[in-house]
Image (cartoon, helix red, strand yellow):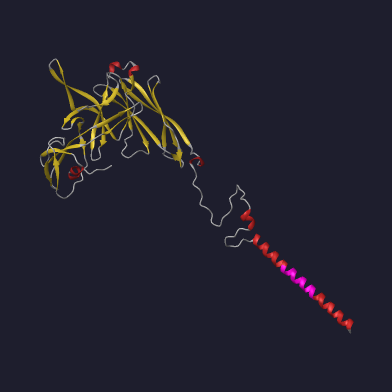
Amino acid sequence: MKEQGTSVAVVTLVAVAVSFAACNRVQGMKSAQAVTGVVAQPAPQKPQPSAAAQTAPAIPSSTPASSASPSPPLAASKSDVRPPKVVVSDRSQTLIVAQQTFHLLTHVQSIEGTTDETVEWWELRDAKEHVVYRESYPVAFENGMFESTVGISANSFTTKQGSGILVHGMELPSAPDSGGWVQVFGFKYGRDKYAADESLFGPFGPPIFIDGEFLDIGTDSFRPTPTSFGGATATVMHDVLKFRVWTGNLNIVYPVLINWISGKLQPAWRCIETTSKGPVERCSYPLTVEAHRDNQPTFVRLFPEADEGFTPKHVIVQPQSKIEYLEARTPIAWNEDAKAISFSVNGDVWIKVRIDGLEGWIHSQEDFDAVGLPQAG
């Protein structure tokens, strides 16, 4: 009996050991499966870095890690965009000046399938195809189009004192109220009898860049210059280019003299005026206005001269008052170098008006507002 009891105890002990080992094996398999699941299937929440990841240095990689929220695509730079297909053409225009033939040749780039085009360079050539003048411009692309465009045109003209060619240029996009530029070419001394001498033909200066608008070519009859020839008085008429220039409240008509003798352009008028503050260089110019009057009574200070040293009259302006805008007086700055000519208002602007038959000069912004000329631009 004792041996039989011992055998039963041994069997029981072996069974317990086998069960314990089996239990350990199952728990180990579950642990291994749990670890393997972390690697193969990331949790939907942002995973916490392991201790190794916290201590190990970062390793640069050329391939960015994937993310649950993809980043928006980056805008392509100008260099990443393939330039469009461009068609190149040469255009020629014939111009007659003093019985001489000239050609304006423009080298144009156009984007195929569009109306977008720009002039890369242009030349003015004489009848023997000699280049009298040449100008070129950079060409760049943006979003499959030209970043900016240049347009060139020309026309011949004849005045009482000479004849020449006027080249017009415009760049887009441009500054507000910009009228592009114009450049004058002609025969020095002006008269047709000198036209046979080709060396006398050329530019009368650099382009005039316009803060306004080129109007036309005409004769300066607004302010004639009297001279004396043997006791008789004669009026000397000048050929001028006329430009519209914005002052901030209105437009003046500014003339540029074509000096056929020197082959240059210059201000048509030089005026020195004596005022209560001393000599002032300014002239009176024709003007154009777009009046926007109030429907309420107001008043202006009407000066007898364009000078604050005089005592003004206070004149009532009714909504039904008749206002006439007669002329403007202002200094104009002329700027010229080898590349460009420009001019602009360079001081106070006075306006001569007639209000219900009473004439005088106004000067301040309050008075400009009272006659319907608010500041703009």
Say whether residue 23 is magenta.
yes
Q: With respect to residue 351, does 59 lie above or below? A: below
The kind of secondary structure the magenta stretch mainly shows is: helix
In the rendered view of the protein, which quadrant contains the C terminus? top left
- Residue found 79% across the figure and 75% down from its top: 16
Q: Residue at x 61, y 55 (%)?
A: 54
Residue appearing at x 49%, y 43% in the figure: 77
Q: Magenta segment: does it hold 25?
A: yes
Which one is nearer the viewer's eye here, 291 or 111?
291
29 versus 373 height, above or below: below
Task: Give the residue displayed 40% in from the left and 36% down from the top.
Answer: 149
> Residue 236: x percent and y percent?
19, 22
Query: Residue 76 appears at what percent x and percent y?
Result: 50, 45
Q: Start and end of the magenta stretch?
A: 16-27
Residue that protrudes farthest toward the bottom in the picture: 1
From the viewer's side, name the closer residue of 338 and 99. Answer: 338
Give the x, y percent position of residue 174. 36, 38
Q: Residue 147: x, y in percent? A: 43, 39
The answer to whether residue 266 is left or right of residue 90 is: left
Quadrant where the N terminus is found in the figure = bottom right
Q: Is residue 293 left or right of residue 163?
A: left
**Which one is in front, 216 or 324?**
324
For the residue pair 245 and 196, the one nearer the viewer reads as 245
Q: Quadrant of residue 208?
A: top left
